[in-house]
Amino acid sequence: MEADITLLVNGRQHTVRVDPATPLLYVLRDQLQLNGPKFGCGLMQCGACMVMLDDVAWPSCQLPVHDVTGGIRITTLEGLAKPDGTLHPVQQAFVDEQAAQCGFCLNGMVMSTVATLQQYPQADEETIRNGMMRVLCRCCVQHRAIRAAQKVVAANKKP
Amino acid sequence: MPTSRRHFLQTTGCLTIGFSLLGPTWATAATEAADELPGSLGDYPRIDSWLEVLADGRVRVLTGKIELGQGIRIAVAQMAAEELNIPLNRVDVVLAETDRTPNEGYTAGSGSIENSATAVRYAAAAARQKLLALAATQLQTRAFQLKTQNGVVTAPNGQTRTFAQLLGGQQLTDEVRLPLALKPKAEYQYVGKAVPRPEIERMVRAQEYYVQDLRFPGMLHARVLRPFNYDSKLVQFDENELKRAVPGLAKAVVNGSFVGLLAEREYDAKLAQDWGKQHVRWTEGRALPAGQPLKDYLRTLPNTPKRVQDKGTLTTAPTLRASYYKPYLMHGSIGPSCAVARYDAAQRRLEVWTHSQGVYPLREALADLLKMPVDTIHVKGVPGSGCYGHNGADDVAADAALLAVATPGRHVRVQWAREDEHCWEPYGSAMVLDLAARLDPATGRLTHWHQQVWTDTHSNRPGGNADKLLPAQYLAQPRRPADNGATDPSAGGYRNADPLYAIPNLRVDAYFFQGPLRVSALRALGAYGNVFAIESFMDELAEKAGLDAWDFRLRNLQDKRAIAVVERARAIARQQQVGENEGLGFAFAQYKNKAAYVAVVAKVSIHEEGTPYRPQLWAVIDAGEVINLDGLKNQTEGGMIQSASWALMEEVKFDQHQVRSRHWEAYPIFHFDEIPYVDVTVIDRPTEPPLGAGEAAQGPTAAALANAVYRATGKRVRELPLRPEKLTREA
């Protein structure tokens, strides 16, 4: 029951032939060969597979690909940097704060923070933590991730 | 074999550049080489085992360790850049790979800095010395008149040579010999500084980095079907029925009770595995000891006793006795284990890409599993999700190897499911600890200590043996590990069971059982349980004797560096205000009694429901000479948070049939709202050797939390985790 599915990923249209029930994660990793979203649990419990759907951060591991057609803007970690390679401020802040050890959960933390700070550019610590609630990190760099997000907020506050 | 690389180079006709080792600049600077070569140099004394000069002037460092997120890549690069006086961005690092890098065994035990980075430091220093000597000859001057910067050697007359020009396409094949002058520490640009890890930018850019990201043309995706119980056997699997249900299934490989499911697309492999969980029948297996306190059950198991410390006499009248318990804990890697393998039937060669902590031991184990000569297997280390010890990495590599051999010519990528990792990883063993001690109330000094430890092994790595590779135990001709090696010191059960305190009469007894769950090395091994018990007990002893907990420890410590760490922690603690329902606790240990010293201060605030929600944690650490300040802090911060998650909420659960902790909801770990506030103070000792630090905070953090909870609630929790119900229960 495969079908042609057209997705808008990182600003470009892609048509893939897959079973429409295939979770978005598998299409992003296997058909589109993207590395940003990671397989962590397949149960929407760990956030490793986080993407943005329009402006909302959402796990992609159980999301049927046919639910995200029709021009929904799908953004992965690859889609955050500018075409000239300049990192998104949230990405840059994670680099500056060295908010990673193994880095496997970095995708979930960065994507969640981008979405949170788009909605709440002046987010306080609780809002930042709440924004990353769906992301698990076992190396335990969460306090650095919070600091990275706070750094972006501080830059937002500057006139 | 450590000599294989040397042999390889000899047989390929690589020229040896030989000359006097002692250049004129430091012939008089050091005495005769009395010491052994440091770190892994003893096994691999040749410079080009550790570094190569590339044609474009870059330097390639070879380490037998793998990057686990602990920052070994940047640490070895710093060492090389420093000693060679070249920019850090001109150093490439090759991680563990058979026949390419030195065989440094496992990346474990917080040993990478001490063994690998130190070897690179000395190799780079020897390389610099030899490059200068070469330049002196070629430029017809004296070595001490030369300057070297950015990979260019400059003579007084302005003539220059790059490293690559000096070598003319050859490598430095000489052995490192002592004495060897190292760069003066006062001139350091990189070592000791908070140098950022360049790979973090790769990660945020989502560039290919992990073994999970490897994609090869024609690669097959596979999952392995595993039963619910360790001892289940396959009863019925109908491949035709599965093919009808999942048309994308390319192939099933069945060997005894090992079932591999391969597909062109990963999602089809997942669907096949999901189908298998519903429809494949297994025998029930062996009943697990559910429905009884595990602590009591473990004491009843047959065990092998070992007296590991026996000094003086045993007291008949201890001041205090107490029993402690640490449950089974999970590594809980966020990315389940993954590996890729390809078998070339014509050449009879196997290639494996793995995030295993030991590519060489894995190669030997795979050779044993597949009955292939060791040198026909090539194993390349590629970073995976953080492992914190021996997780499913080796097992999934064996899965991939078996399936690749059954599918020649195709790359086979095996991805464990979340449930595979949760249920089949080898956990950190549960431990029961009985402590008894006597102190002299007049002096506040400990006179007697008796520690009894009941534990399974904390190291069940395959080594060179296939028996401990998970799939090997389910084949038609199954392999069974004969001995879990628990009594060996490296098995970790009594790691840190011997308190660092000066105690004239000390006995440590270990009792090694084989517990109900699969176990192996989890960060800090037995030190986590032992330090939790010792440092909880120290607080209990101090209270019993009416002594201040800080004074009591300081009176019983003799090691000056230990005292300095504890005193610094006390200064931090004294600055804290403690309110109602709050408590301040602390704990101290030197990891392995020979690696980094860590004191942790914990402040908890107990909410009505009994949760020590979002504690504050401060660490003071002395890891000797600091190589990367931010790396050391990152490891220590992460270690404290991870240990706090273990201590406050984690415990592997099972029923009579199976492990119940099958996913994150059934085995909760810290979420973002619970993350403690952490702060790390580093005592740098540039003139001391660097000490392993990555596991040093685990034990002290757990005990500091238990001690803080006691101060806040009056409840002494001796059985981890520190669950709310234990804190609200009426005494």
Image: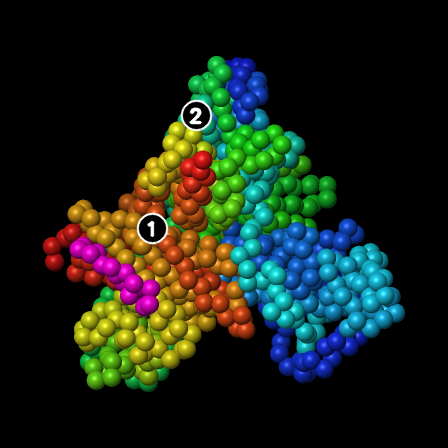
Parent chain of label 1: B
| Residue designated by label 1 | B676
Q: Is residue B583 magenta?
A: yes
Q: Which element carries disc 1, helix, strand or loop?
A: loop
Where residue A14 sits: x, y (%)? 57, 20
Q: Compared to A129, does B506 lie above or below?
A: below
| Residue designated by label 2 | A55
The residue positioned 17% from the left and 47% from the top of the image is: B608
Q: Compared to B684, does B629 lie above or below?
A: above
Q: How dense is the environment of label 1, judged by Cα within 10 Å: few (below 14), some, or many (20 and up)?
A: many
Quadrant for the C terminus of chain B in the image: bottom left
Quadrant for the N terminus of chain B in the image: bottom right
Quarter assignment of residue B660: top left
| Residue A59 or residue B254, whichever sits in front | A59
Q: Compared to B265, does A138 lie above or below?
A: below
Q: Which element carries disc 2, helix, strand or loop?
A: loop
Q: Which three-letter amino acid code belongs to the residue tagged 1?
A: Pro
